[in-house]
Amino acid sequence: MLGPSGRAGAEGGLSMLVLDQVTAGYHRRSLRAGRERTTVVHEVDLRVEAGEIVALVGESGCGKSTLARMVVGLHRPFSGQVRLDGADVHRLRAGERRTFRREVQMIFQDPFLPLSPRLPVGRAVAEPLEIHRVGSRASRRCRVAELLELVGLGNDLTDRLPRDLSGGQRQRVAIARALAVEPRLLICDEPVTALDVSVQAKVLNLLRDLCESLGLACLFIAHDLAVVCQLADRVAVMYLGRIIEQAPTTLLTGHPRHPYTQALLAAVPRLAAGRPVPPPLPGEPAAPGTGLTGCAFQPRCARREPRCLRERPQLDPISPQHLVACHVPAPARMLATPSRRAP
């Protein structure tokens, strides 16, 4: 059985990506206390196997994007390690870091972010190839045409500027740009949040098909469980900087055991006539860095016990593939599972 940190892969080897007891946050200056540290990610254990799509789900502000930035080397953890193929990504030498930047690519929520407003689409997609000195000018033009076709865009967009494209087209260009240097791991930070629902479905299907056909691993970050059910092989649910439940997608959506995961699933819209609307969770999440004793979810939990106020639950297995951090996990019961594929 795999431990929570995923130090061993599915066949006993190293997992491609491992987050091992990672704690991170930000420093800020205060007139009273000088330099203060705010922790937003707490002792996170997570793994992504080669060719696997893992979704990280949670409310805004729970630390998902900070974690994503650590994986690509843009933010250093306070403690713990982020390892790719066993190597700490924050201790790589110059040559190793250059290779790492080709192997791990990030797709952002805002499709404008990686695209210069002054660069035509063809130049934007070719830019990573130029930076990493891949191929000749002629071979790069051919590669750009292949990439645009791969993401479902015509070669006639090569000379158009990002402002001339729709949101879905811009996100496809951003995906083509990320794929240009043939990465092994994609980090997707809410890449469909800014898109219309119909466009979301197309982009999700595109990402799933690309990961399957190219053998890519993917860490997909979202706040909507309905979105990741269409895409992910495994889901980790985060609350206030900690992973509180983790399981294969069908197991987690069919048998959620943490009350927060159950609330997220109950909030997924369904078309069933007369379906009762679940009551919203009481209260609001505490601010990042708030020192809470015991379980961080206990102020909003209807099942809390005295122990929940005193002791923080650990992320422990309740079955070979299902990890839960809860003193009183709900009994397993089958729920209606959202579709794994978008229409």
Image: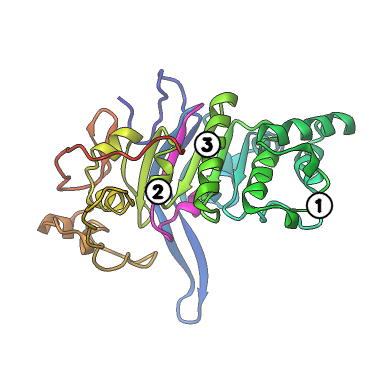
Q: Residue at x 50, y 62 (%)?
A: 26
Name the disc covering residue 84, or none.
none
Work out which residue is located at the far left of the displayed protein and give it.
306
Looking at this rendering, what residue extends furthest in the top direction?
11
Residue 85 in sight = yes
Badge 2 density bin: few <14, some 14–19, many ≥20, Cα 10 Å:
many
Q: Quadrant of residue 206?
A: top right
Residue marked by disc 1 = 119
Q: Is 274 left, or right, of 289 in this rendering?
A: left
Q: Give the range drawn in magenta.
A: 50-67
Secondary element at image label 3: helix
Judging depth in this view, the residue of 67 and 207 nearest the camera is 207
Q: Does the magenta stretch include residue 52?
A: yes
Which numbered disc flags the more N-terminal residue, 3 or 1? Answer: 1
In the image, residue 302 lies in the stretch drawn in magenta? no
Q: Give the residue at mark 2.
A: 57
Q: Earlier in the sequence, mark 2 or mark 1?
A: 2
Instruction: Report the amino acid beneath label 3.
Output: Asn
Q: Which amino acid, by three-letter code, is at mark 1?
A: Leu
Q: Which amino acid does label 2 sit on?
A: Val
> How did the renderer colour the structure?
rainbow
In the rendered image, the vertical position of residue 274 relative to residue 334, given as above or below: below
- Residue 205: mark in rendering: 3
Q: Does the image show residue 84?
A: no
Q: Dot 2 lies on which element?
A: strand
Q: Which of marks 3 and 2 is nearer the N terminus?
A: 2
**Alpha carbon distance from label 3 to label 1:** 27 Å
Residue neighbourhood size for the residue with mark 3, other residues' Cα within 10 Å, grouped as few (<14), some (14–19), many (≥20) = some
